[in-house]
Image: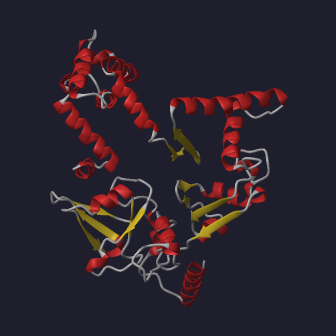
Amino acid sequence: MAAQVALARRDSPHRGGQHLRLAVALTGELPHTLAALAAGQISEWRATLIARETACLSVEHRRQVDAELAARPGGMGAMGDRGIAAEARRVGYRLDPYAVTDRAAKAASERRVSLRPAPDAMTWLGALLPAAHGVAAYAALTKDADSRRPHGDERGRGQIMANTLVERLTGQASASAVPVQIQLVMTDRTLLAGDPEPVELDGYGPLPAPLVRGWLRGDDDQLGDDGHGLAEAAQMWVRRLYTAPDTGHLIAMDSNRRCFDGQLRRFLISADRRCRTPWCDAPIRHLDHPLPVAQGGQTTAANSQGLCEACNYTKQTPGWHTILHPDRVVETITPTGHRYHSRPPPVIGQTGAPERASPTHHRTKQHSVIEQHLRDLLNAA
């Protein structure tokens, strides 16, 4: 049900689950919150905060929190996001402190590290930790930064903390000496001829071409560090996936195995980039056969789609069906009969330049030789 709600709202499956849980809570356990939402006194986000902060409580205690919040002067509409979440927690702590304690113990088992893109070719590296661990880690970085600046370190406090984090996590002597494997999808024109076509970095997204060329040259100003450039300080591997010069499509690869693995797996992840379920955008964890192997589907690039773990499991449940159309277009049919189409992302270098991928483009002997050479390189890598 959650996956179908997500598709209907054009949201990710994770968001669909949140919408469904919120609807169940509002209609069955939080009547005052539902009334405030319907009257426009609070936003959907504030209703979500109340539901989230009371999720560990019993139905009776949840309704009591709901009633107490509504009885505050000015009602729920008088409180902001932080205020309404804090009040919901405060009342819940008073009504059932043991439930909150048990929830905190469970939350500690869900600690994790995440990575998401940020503007200007930066990333947010985050960690969900128990409060004591998070405060201790931040205090250690702060103390180290504060001890370096009086001794002449001209970097800002935040810069020192960021570099120290990288150095301690990777075990390197400096933040620029980290060995990396960069899987970039770019055109040969971008790499060699100064073309402005953006580059796709696996696990991150698009990057400006001049920035990536600076990385490959080891330009210090592109790395934000006072040390040596990346190319000078650490080993670097660049895996290149080229498009066919006449069609604009990535060179196809296939396998005799049932599972997508090895070079074919890396190839398809670079081609699809993110989960192919419409509006999901989660990282690819599984590679799936739209036409199942049991029905004669082959383990080829043409019969493939990259999915996150949750979407792949959902696809296997009763009532869900997929139909493979030409050019790797996948049609998903939900148990309610709704149909959604998923198309592969645009090929790098083809957006805004359809003439490069025109089917009427004359295929030359030189193009055939280049394509075969690139295919040989991919199969040998």
The spot of residue 308 in percent (x, y) is 39, 58
Q: Nearer the viewer, residue 145 or 29?
A: 29
Q: Position of residue 74 (x, y in %)?
A: 27, 11
Can you say whether 185 is above or below 114 in the image? below
Colour convention: secondary structure
At horizontal 78% and vertical 58% (from top left) the residue drawn is 232
Q: Tell me the quarter of the picture where residue 18 sits.
A: top left
- x then y, percent, for residue 170: 68, 50
* Residue drawn at 46 percent across, 69 percent down: 268
Q: In the rendering, at what x and y percent does residue 32 appear?
A: 20, 22
- Tally of numbered discs: 0
- Closer to the camera, 24 or 78? 24
The residue lying toward the viewer, choosing from 46 and 54, is: 54
Q: Find the residue positioned furthest to the right.
A: 151
- The outermost residue toward the top is 73
Q: Is residue 223 left or right of residue 131?
A: right
Quadrant holding the C terminus = bottom right
Q: Can residue 347 be seen at all in this image of the molecule?
A: no
- Residue at left 46%, top 37%? 108
Say which quarter of the image contains residue 219: bottom right
Residue at image position (51%, 33%) is: 130
Of residue 90 and residue 239, the one placed in the foreground of this image is 90
**80 shown above or below 343:** above
Q: Is residue 151 left or right of residue 276?
A: right
Q: Is residue 339 above or below residue 222?
A: below
Say left or right for 281 vs 190. Answer: left
Residue 240 is at least partly visible in this image: yes
